[in-house]
Image (cartoon, helix red, strand yellow):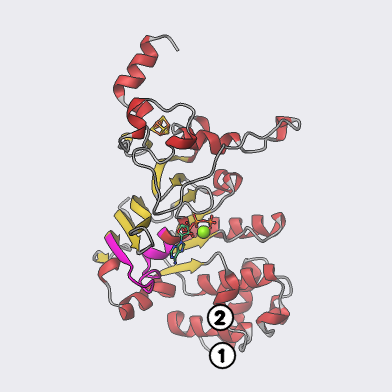
Amino acid sequence: MSAILEVSELRLSIPARGGPACPVDGVSFSLSPGECVGLVGESGSGKSLTSQTLIGLTREIPGVRIEGSVRWQPEGQQPRELLKMSERELTGVRGGEIGMVFQDPLSCLNPLFRVDYQIGEVLARHCGLKGKAAFERTVELLASVGVPQPEQRARQYPHQLSGGLRQRVILAMTLAGEPRMLIADEPTTALDVTVQAQILRELGKLRRERGLAILFITHDLGVVAQVCDRVMVMYAGRIVEQAPVKQFFDNPRHPYSRGLLESLPTLSGGGARLTSIPGSPPQPGSFPAGCRFCPRCSLAIEPCQAEYPPAFGDERHSASCWLLRESEVGSRTDGGS
Ligand SMILES: Nc1ncnc2c1ncn2[C@@H]1O[C@H](COP(=O)(O)OP(=O)(O)OP(=O)(O)O)[C@@H](O)[C@H]1O
Ligand code: SF4
Ligand SMILES: [Mg+2]
């Protein structure tokens, strides 16, 4: 199936004290209709800035420079370059074609208007629904994302709802526009597991029924295993590994990915100590030369400090680590390890 979104060499450069910092530094990936791709990595790795840059939300940063390409091609339409769109064109794409649930949901609701009014605005703009039909659809949407007593909640103001409920209202509002793609930045982190499961089920249904493509940003590898088809691991502004979910969990190739997986608690672990990756990720503007994971990597070899590794592997499963180049793999195999 042809990609609905094709991102090539996306780079975001922001002026900083010691010269420009690149919190997103050459990111490439694609997304097909109906596919859910997880974007994971430690705090500060550039996940949110990557997703925001795709839809023009980082254009306002003073002195920013954005390079690369973000090709958007919903089925039956000509491809369009999102990075070259005017703000007006992009506003049409956001909400209508691409929905986004932010990490900070409170900033998305207007405290002055009731929930039904705010969702109703989206329904009127994108689906032509008004009056009773819009209210009924609002109630349906709220119920689908696990809002109890949806009729009553629809008539309330944001301050009358808990944080978890507001997060669900935002998701309902985003889905109201019937987007082709959803960017979900930590959408379920603040929710309890039952509601989280309900939302993940609802998103699964939209993928199957409407071909909704999802870029799912999360810290939770358990959720990735549950809902994603593929996973991309981000470290210091770059994607260091991408793979189908099963391959990733069975055979992670990048030492950083292995570290992330080893930090996961297991049900059978019997209280075993979690291994966490020593040290902390570098800040944009002071990324080390060579492999950016090198200062924390116990497996580093000769070229690691000097040269950034290219992606080794194939289109489905690739990782940027010098240990994966043919001569290394060969020598380790020859050595009988
Ligand atoms: N507007 C901005 N201007 C300059 N630097 C920024 C800006 N927003 C974020 N950063 C920096 O860019 C880096 C990446 O930030 P980003 O928010 O994308 O991380 P993240 O991977 O989403 O982290 P988290 O998991 O904590 O949400 C961080 O070091 C952050 O401090
Ligand atoms: S390239 Fe070298 S330093 Fe980087 S992850 Fe691989 S082994 Fe470690
Ligand atoms: Mg973030």
Image: 65 above or below 135: above
Q: Nearer the viewer, residue 120 or 255?
A: 255
Give the residue pinned by disc 1. 131
| Quarter of the view holding residue 193 | bottom right
Q: Does the magenta portion include 52?
A: yes
182 shown above or below 244: below
Residue pointed to by mark 2: 119
- Which one is earlier in the sequence, the residue at label 2 or at label 1? 2
Q: Is residue 208 visible?
A: no
Q: Residue 42, position in %: x, y?
A: 53, 48
- Neighbours of disc 1 within 10 Å: few (<14), some (14-19), many (20+): few
Label 1: which secondary element: helix
Q: How many C-alpha atoms fall within 10 Å of the one at disc 2: few (<14), some, or many (≥20)?
A: many
Quadrant of the rendering where the C terminus is positioned: top left
Residue 49 placed where, x, y %?
43, 61
Camera-side residue: 189 or 300?
Answer: 300
Under mark 2, the amino acid is: Ile
Q: Is residue 272 left or right of residue 324?
A: right
The residue at 44%/40% (across/down) is: 244
Q: Residue at x 52, y 88 (%)?
A: 130
- In space, the residues marked 2 and 1 are separated at their CA atoms by 12 Å
224 left or right of 35 in image: right
Considering every residue shown, the one lying at the far front of the view is: 18
The residues colored magenta run 50-67
- Looking at the picture, tell me which residue is in the foreground, 226 or 277: 277
Left or right: 1, with 163 as reference point: left
Say if the magenta span includes residue 132: no
Pick the residue in front: 312 or 192: 312
Q: Kindly check if marks 2 and 1 are in contact, taking CB atoms under 8 A apart as contact.
A: no
Rendering coords of residue 114 (x, y %):
63, 86
The residue lying at 24 percent from left, 66 percent from top is 78
Q: Amino acid at mark 1?
A: Gly
